[in-house]
Amino acid sequence: MEQKELTPAVVRMLQTFLEDPERVFYATELMEAARVGSGSLYPALARMERDKWIESEDEDADPREKGRPVRRYYRMTRKGALEAHVALVELSESVRPPASSPGWKLSPKLNRLSSKLHGLTSGLRISPEAKGIRAL
């Protein structure tokens, strides 16, 4: 998926899928969890399926017995989880303000706090799970 396709709605959908890449959603569930409307949801799902980031299948049920239409279920693929994670990191890097931006200049008090925090954490090793990366 190209970066220009990573709209705010798509980003929220990817974040929702990545919270538990093995979870299966039906459309209404995903719309509510990601806080997106159907006008954003279905085109994004089509692009993600085109790029093999998700797979979908129809519910195996009789709509007359259920009293509702058959649901379509969506699940993230292994490829999708890996590529979506990378795409979100790249997007984050591309929209980060430059280090010379006034927002990056810490006040003296925050600068001291940052130095103390860095001193406390410099010897720690962070596991891939803590960074939000896990093997599927």
Image: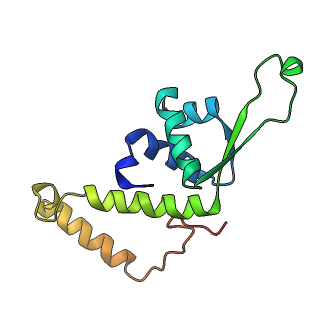
Question: Which one is in front, 68 or 116?
Answer: 68
Q: Is residue 74 toward the left or the right of residue 61 in the image?
A: left
x, y percentage for residue 100? 10, 64
- Identify the residue shown where x is 63% and y is 62%: 78
Does residue 57 appear to the left or right of 112 in the view shown? Answer: right
**In this figure, what is the number of numbered marks?**
0
Q: Which image quarter: residue 46?
A: top right
Q: Residue at x 52, y 34 (%)?
A: 41
Residue lying at the far bottom in this picture: please name it.
123
Give x and y (percent) for residue 117.
32, 70
State the quadrant of the C terminus.
bottom right
- Judging depth in this view, the residue of 51 and 96 nearest the camera is 51
Which of the colour schemes (rainbow, by chain, secondary structure, one colour) is used? rainbow
Q: Residue at x 63, y 33 (%)?
A: 27
Q: Please provide percent x and percent y for residue 53.
A: 58, 55
In the rendered image, the quadrant that contains the N terminus is bottom left
Report the residue at 49% width, 67% height from top. Answer: 131
Quadrant of residue 94 within the rendered picture: bottom left
Relative to 136, is 2 on the left or the right? left
